[in-house]
Amino acid sequence: MTAETRGQATRALAPLQPLLPYALRYKGRIALAFVALSVASLATLAAPLAVRGMIDHGFSSESSGAINSYFGAMIAVVATLALASGARYYLVMTLGERVVTDLRTDVFRHLASLDAAFYDTAKIGELVSRLSADTTQMKAAFGSSASVALRNLFLFVGAIVMMVATSPKLSGLVLVAIPIIVLPLIASGRVVRKRSRHAQDTLAGANAYATENLAAVRTMQACGAQQSTIGRFSRAAEGAYEAALAATKTRAIVTTIGIFLAFASVVAVLWLGATDVLAGRISSGLLSQFVLYAVLGASSLGELSQVWSEVQAAAGAAGRIGEILAIRPKIVAPARPVALPRPPRGRIVFDNVSFSYPSGRDGAAIDRLNLTVEPGERVAIVGPSGAGKSTLFQLLLRFYDVSSGSIRLDDIDVRDLDPAALRATIALVPQEPAAFGASVAENIAYGRDGASHDAIVRAAERAQATGFIAALPGGYDTRLGERGVTLSGGERQRLAIARAILADAPVLLLDEATSALDAENEALVQEALRGVMAGRTTLVIAHRLATVLEADRILVMDGGRIVEEGTHASLIGEGGLYARLARLQFDAGRAALAAHDAHDATAAE
């Protein structure tokens, strides 16, 4: 094998090398698999010896009794082969399952650690495809393919050794043919790997499209987009099929060439051997023994050609997994994180903070902002859409790092804190709360696995959620649909409020926490939130100005800056942006009320 060929083989297998540590965790199982593999290979290689003895000596009249011994030996060889092969298959296949399970866990752990900037552009469906389809593809490399490859490699090497020991002359032809067979297999590896990678990429794209549209199936159906969506997915699926077909075709061609060349060499050897038997230079038993070893070697080489193609496909999948594992999160804990005071006080300082999203959209989201919130203070933040209100929350939670300036919690820069410790001191109720396909109790206790059932119930009571929970068929044990689709927006929001109550954090962030509630439920939840906010530093984002009247301070944001600050009465008196927003909102409320009254009057007539 030339240096270039060895280099091609090394490069072909390079994507699989980072995965070897996963297999090396189970050295004991690997050792047992090698023992079973060795025993099975030796038993297979012993069979031609028994056949030679039976042909040369077992059919003569003077040694008719020896045939029983030969057949008895062959039965023992077959039994050993069967037991060792079964053990080898079990050990190698379970090793593959174990390795892929560990890999999937690590990939998911890595995905969970990546920051918000990564998910701003990532396609969830494609990530799920890599987590499932690609790891399944790799399971073959560590499972069945590894088992077949090792077995056939042992048999191939053993058969070559035994052929040389049996007839050096006939072995010469076989050894000359081996490079002719092997070189095309290695040379084709790059093509197979490239086409397999393309097939996996195309499939991941189709999965991403399906995931995105099924997640919004109600919108798809409401807009009458079923047929166009089905058509587009069908074209994507067809593209994935054609890519897989091209990869399979290449692998089939490689396998065909490998098997033909391997067995053609056996036919040539058989022809030369037959002439030697006729000339009396070797016995028919020795030729049979040599041919059996040649067939073993050829079949093993043919199997290796097929396995090589499968390994190339697995290398493509491993490359895709490796790309994910190579992504480094931008938000990480410092080498020596600073500890927050115990208990945390909840003092928040934004010191000349500027921030632009990584995509660079819309310029600076926050522009040289300064803000101090004292422990226990209740601050409301209002302003038009796109003013930067929610961005403040994301920066405080350190989903992103500031472009300049600093954010401090209890006089400690949040970049000096462990992100997990930082977020443990903050409870968030987002505008669009997440609900999961788990039980109601598990949704409330999300992130608080040790919470007792009594604590969960108390949190639900304080969030005014017990009414709709009691109406569910299983109460707190009722399993919700994926993303909580069986709940209304207001019900999901009350679950999120209960989750924040259960967290019992010193800092509370409410991002339009009552936006999905009707007037009656909003009043109930506002009453509950008064108790929750007591003694906690609270930041409230609200479009409904009625929800911020009780705040200690109201901040008005526009263009990433705080443009006004004060109480409701003082801001109305200033006649600025807040007064204009209030006037528009209250005018809209009066118009809606007038329309409602007119409708009632018409109905009465």
Image (cartoon, helix red, strand yellow):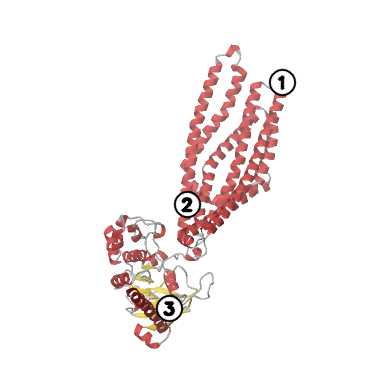
> What kind of residue is marked 3?
Gly
Percent of width and height locating residue 386: 47, 75
Above or below residue 429? Residue 6 is above
- How far separated are the C-alphas under marks 1 and 2? 61 Å
Mark nearest the camera among 1 and 2 is: 2
Which label number is shown at residue 383?
A: 3
Quadrant showing the C terminus: bottom left
Residue 169 against residue 567 in the figure, above or below: above
Q: Which residue extends farthest front?
A: 605
Tell me if residue 147 comes above or below residue 478 in the rendering. above
Which type of secondary structure does the marked residue at label 2 adopt? helix
Q: Which mark is residue 104?
A: 2
How far, Cα to Cα, is label 3 from label 1?
101 Å
The percent position of residue 231, horizontal first and vertical second, equals 56, 56
Give the side of residue 135 with respect to residue 164, left or right.
Answer: left
| First of labels 1, 2 by sequence position | 2
Residue located at (60% from left, 39% from top)? 304
Determine which of the numbered discs, if any, sits on residue 424 in the image. none
Q: Nearer the viewer, residue 357 or 240?
A: 240
Q: Quadrant of residue 565?
A: bottom left
What is the quadrant of the N terminus in the image?
Answer: top right
Residue under pointer 1? 278
Residue ID at (70%, 24%)? 274
Q: Earlier in the sequence, mark 3 or mark 1?
A: 1
Q: Residues within 10 Å of mark 1 (few under 14, many from 20)?
A: few
Callout 3: 10 Å neighbours few (<14), some, many (20+)?
many
Asked which secondary structure carries label 3, the reply is: loop
**Dividing the picture into quarters, in which one does residue 490 lie?**
bottom left
Q: Who is closer to the viewer here, 341 or 440?
A: 440
Q: What secondary structure is marked by label 1? A: helix
- Hey, what amino acid is under mark 2? Arg
Inspect the image, locate mark 1, and give the three-letter code of the amino acid beneath it: Leu
